[in-house]
Each structure stands twice: as C-alpha cells, then as structure tokens.
Image: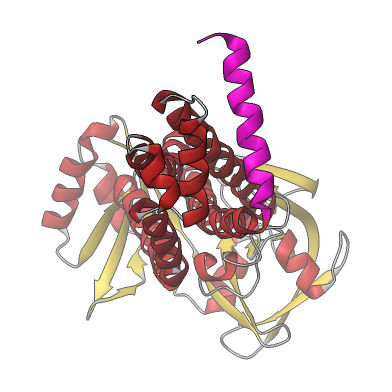
Amino acid sequence: MSLNSHMNVLDFTLLSLLRRKFKNLGIVLVFTFIVFITGSILFLSYSFKREALLILKGSPELIVQRMSAGRQELIPVGRAKEISAIPGVSGVEPRYWGYYYDPLVKANYTILASSGSLSAGNRLLQGRLPAPEEKGVAAVGRGVAKARFIDMGSTISLVSAAGDAMDFDVVGIFESESELLTADLIVLGRPDVIRLFRMPPDMATDLAVTVRNETEAPVIAGKIRSRFPDTRPILRKEIIRTYDAVFGWRSGLILTLFAGALVAFIILAWDKATGLSAEEKKEIGILKAIGWETSDIIEMKFWEGLVISLSSFLLGIILAYVHVYFFGASVFAPALKGWSVIYPDFRLAPFIDPYQIAMLMALTVIPYIASTIIPSWKAAITDPDEVVRG
C-alpha cells in the first residue's frame, strides 16, 4: 500500500470524525477529564515524594528520641556523650525544637534552635541565621513572614510557656531547596528556644546522630536501643519510607473519591468494544462494497481511535501539568499537604516520572484503540450486503 493510499485513509478518517463531531467531542471530554484527574494526582504525589527527598537528603542518618507511655519526651543531653562513644558514630548533636500555636493567625509554627549544621542546604533570601547562642533575634520562613506581615527589621512576638511575652528582631527570611521545609519555620538561638518552651537546661528534644558508614546505621540503632531501652532510634530510610507511604495512601484515597468518573470511562470503552452503531456498520459495509480491504478498515479505525485517545491523553496531561505546576494543584493539594495551616506558595519543581506517564498511557490509550479496532474488524470480515442490510 503506497504512502498516498495511507494519506487518503487518514484524510477519510478525519472527515469521518468531523461527521460525528458531537459524539466524539463527548468522548474526548470524558477521556480528557479522566487523564486530567489521574495525571494531576500522579504529578502531585510524585513531586511531594521528591520534595521529601530534598528535605531529608541533608538530615542525620539517625535520630534518637526518648519515649514515655508511647509518646516522645525530652531526652537527657548527657546521653550524647555515651552514644558518641559507640564505634561507628562520628558525632551526636542535641536538637532543640518544638511546635508553637499562634492564635493570631490560627497556625502552628515549628520553632527550631540554630546550630552549626542548620545552614547546610538553606539559601537565605535576606539577612542571616541567628548564632547558636544569640538571643533576641529570629529567622523566619516565608510562610510565617506573610502570615504575620513582617519583613527584615520587623519584630515578631511569641508567648513563652511561662506566659511571658518574648520579642525577636527578624534578621533573616529564608527558604531552602524545598519550600515544604521552611514555610512555617522560625529559627531562634538555643537559649531562647529553651526559655520559650521552659525546657530544663540538661534536656533536649532529641539527638541527631551522624555515622561514618550509613550501612552501619541499623546496627548502631540496635546498640542504642539496647543501651537505652526507653529510646526510639529512627533511621533516615524509615522516614523516607513513611513519606512514600503517606503520600501514596493519600493519592490513592483521592483516586478512590473519583472512582465514579473512572467507572464512567470504563463503561464508555466497554460500550465501544461491544459493538458499533448502525451508522458505523453501514459505513463499513459501503466501504467494503466499493473496494476497501479489511486492512484498510482496520487502519481507518486505528487512526480514529489514535486521534481521539492520543489527543485526549495529551490534552489531559497538559492540563494536569499546568494545574499542578502553575496553579499549585489547588484542587488536590489541601488533601495531600496535611494538617498544617501555613502552606508555602507551592510552586513545585516539575518532577515527572516517565514510567507513570507510560503506565497511564498504557491503561487509557491502548485499551481505547483496541476497543475501537476489534468491533470494526468483526464488521469488516462480514459480507458487505449483510452489514448494509443490518
């Protein structure tokens, strides 16, 4: 079959689609909607996971928490020296942090004490971070700055656990490689964090443990648990797996909510697979009668299914991309972000998994093309006179 013949088949296919434009438009709208919903959720959940990796890539290999009655408690700072003596441990740093509820904006902040390792991976927009032992100054995330309408040189007031008002001069407004990390963050000097939360001077929130060989982290965690039975060592790999599980579960929940739309698409594809309309059968019979081969009919229906499904798929993927990466995934982001009130602007970096795109195409485009070709092939191998008569 010559190239000119293939072009004639394609031209006839496009004219045939235009003759049934309203029916095909309905199919395109449903197809596009399904791809848009699924693509948005896949893009968003995958980007969240990549954001989580950006957050955790600079975190310590091991975090040691003290537990009491199943809840985290403050841990004695003196244990840092004992843990640092374990073979394979290169350093132990006490961390001072906690959550602070701000009734002015009805939001929770994360308060963190400044340390020497905090600046790693952070990119200051303006100013600087407080020194570890500095008092009366703070660096805030962009979310906090917007919520409290503060800028460089402004003052932010917090109320300590003892009921005392504490004022801090804002010396830095910063972000990191991931906005999810710093949107609700306030960094203070260690003495101010201790005073704000009324922490005993010999206690810390947890201990960050750095190991020489990351593969030895599980062994070191076991030694810590054996020496201090009331502690819970948390590996960085475990935190990453938790993020994957949480975002995977939430994206699956949203997909379940839109299961009705998915069922509608399945019914649509099944309807096409179970048979052609009388008009379509008559058209195939006439084409066979005027000399079209069965292969020509199959090619025509292949192009018809490909044009509709691929156009709908590309349109749905483009809309999903724009929705997630230009409009902040306003439809689904609140369900996936979690409980926090202060959200970042959420201009996520475009992280796209080609495997997910290929799987989505395999589950939508290929079945639709098959459901278009199979009934057409059955009609094409039937006697034209019988097909035209119905």
Q: Nearer the viewer, residue 234 or 96?
A: 234
Q: Nearer the viewer, residue 122 or 53?
A: 53
In the shown orientation, is residue 191 left or right of residue 257?
right
Residue 33 left/right relative to 175: left
Q: Quadrant of the C terminus?
A: bottom left
Q: What residue occupies the far left of the structure in this picture?
A: 226
Q: Which SS type dominates the magenta stretch? A: helix
* Magenta stretch contains residue 20: yes
User: Please, is residue 21 above or below residue 106 in the view?
Assistant: above
40, 218: nearer the viewer: 40
- Image point (74%, 60%), residue name: 142
Q: Locate residue 99, reporting x and y percent.
A: 53, 74
Quadrant position of residue 231 = bottom left
Numbered-mark total = 0
Q: Residue at x 29, y 51 (%)?
A: 238
Image coordinates of residue 305 in percent, x first then y, are: 50, 40
251 left or right, relative to 166: left
Does 376 appear above or below 155? above
Q: Residue furthest bottom?
A: 163
Q: Tell me which segment is drawn in magenta.
A: 1-21
The question of residue 101 being in magenta is answered with no
Q: Give the camera-side residue of 277 and 181.
A: 277
Question: What percent of the width, then of the height, locates residue 25?
Answer: 64, 55
Q: Position of residue 300 (x, y in %)?
A: 52, 32
Is residue 63 among the parts visible in the rendering?
yes
Residue 120 seen in the figure: no
Q: Residue at x 50, y 65 (%)?
A: 336
Q: Is residue 155 above or below residue 93?
A: below
